[in-house]
């Protein structure tokens, strides 16, 4: 069995008489991995955010610190997480770029 992460890997031999133990360990590791996976926002989450999200996008667009590329990257992250719609993304991006 081989276990791999972003920073390390480990290879462990499995003996036929201990295969069930290896399956048990693999199942536990998979359960831990799934429980730590980030959850994407649902439409109910987006509705609950409503005005707060519009305010966040407005602050992002009008912020003076980050470059336009950084702003668009942050905006893209919001779009990828389905926190802003495609139309809201395009409108905010046009404002950032001054189009």
Image (tube, rainbow, N blue to C red):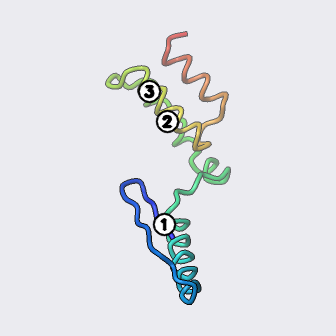
Q: Which mark is residue 55?
A: 2
Label 1 neighbourhood size at 10 Å, few (<14), some (14-19), many (20+)? few
Q: Nearer the viewer, mark 1 or mark 2?
A: 1
Q: Secondary structure at mark 3?
A: helix
Q: Earlier in the sequence, mark 3 or mark 2?
A: 2
Q: State left or right for residue 51 relative to residue 42.
A: left
Q: State left or right for residue 15 relative to residue 6.
A: right
Q: Residue at left 36%, top 55%?
A: 7
Spatial CA span between label 1 and label 3: 40 Å
Please determine whether, in this image, residue 33 is positioned above or below residue 57: below
Percent x, y for residue 76? 54, 32
Please determine whether, in this image, residue 51 is positioned above or below residue 65: below
Q: Secondary structure at mark 2?
A: helix
Spatial CA span between label 1 and label 2: 47 Å
Depth check: give the residue in front, 88 or 71. 71
Q: Which mark is residue 71?
A: 3
Q: State left or right for residue 7 relative to residue 34.
A: left
Percent x, y for residue 59? 43, 31
Q: Nearer the viewer, mark 3 or mark 2?
A: 3
Most extreme residue toward the left, as rendered?
A: 65
Percent x, y for residue 47? 64, 48
Q: Earlier in the sequence, mark 1 or mark 3?
A: 1
Q: Earlier in the sequence, mark 1 or mark 2?
A: 1
Q: Residue at left 40%, top 66%?
A: 10
Q: Nearer the viewer, mark 1 or mark 3?
A: 1
Depth check: give the residue in front, 10 or 64. 10
Q: Residue at left 50%, top 11%?
A: 98
Most extreme residue toward the bottom, as rendered?
A: 17
Q: Quadrant of residue 68?
A: top left
Residue linked to disc 1: 2
Label 3 neighbourhood size at 10 Å, few (<14), some (14-19), many (20+)? many
Q: Secondary structure at mark 1?
A: strand
């Amino acid at each position: 069995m081989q276990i791999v992460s972003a920073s390390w890997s480990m290879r462990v031999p499995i003996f036929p008489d201990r295969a069930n133990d290896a399956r048990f360990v693999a199942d536990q590791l998979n359960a831990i991995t799934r429980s730590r996976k980030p959850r994407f926002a649902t439409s109910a989450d987006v509705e609950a955010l409503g005005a707060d999200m519009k305010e966040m996008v407005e602050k992002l667009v009008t912020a003076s610190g980050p470059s336009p590329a950084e702003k668009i990257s942050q905006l893209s992250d919001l779009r990828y997480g389905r926190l802003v719609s495609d139309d809201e993304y395009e409108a905010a991006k046009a404002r950032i770029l001054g189009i």
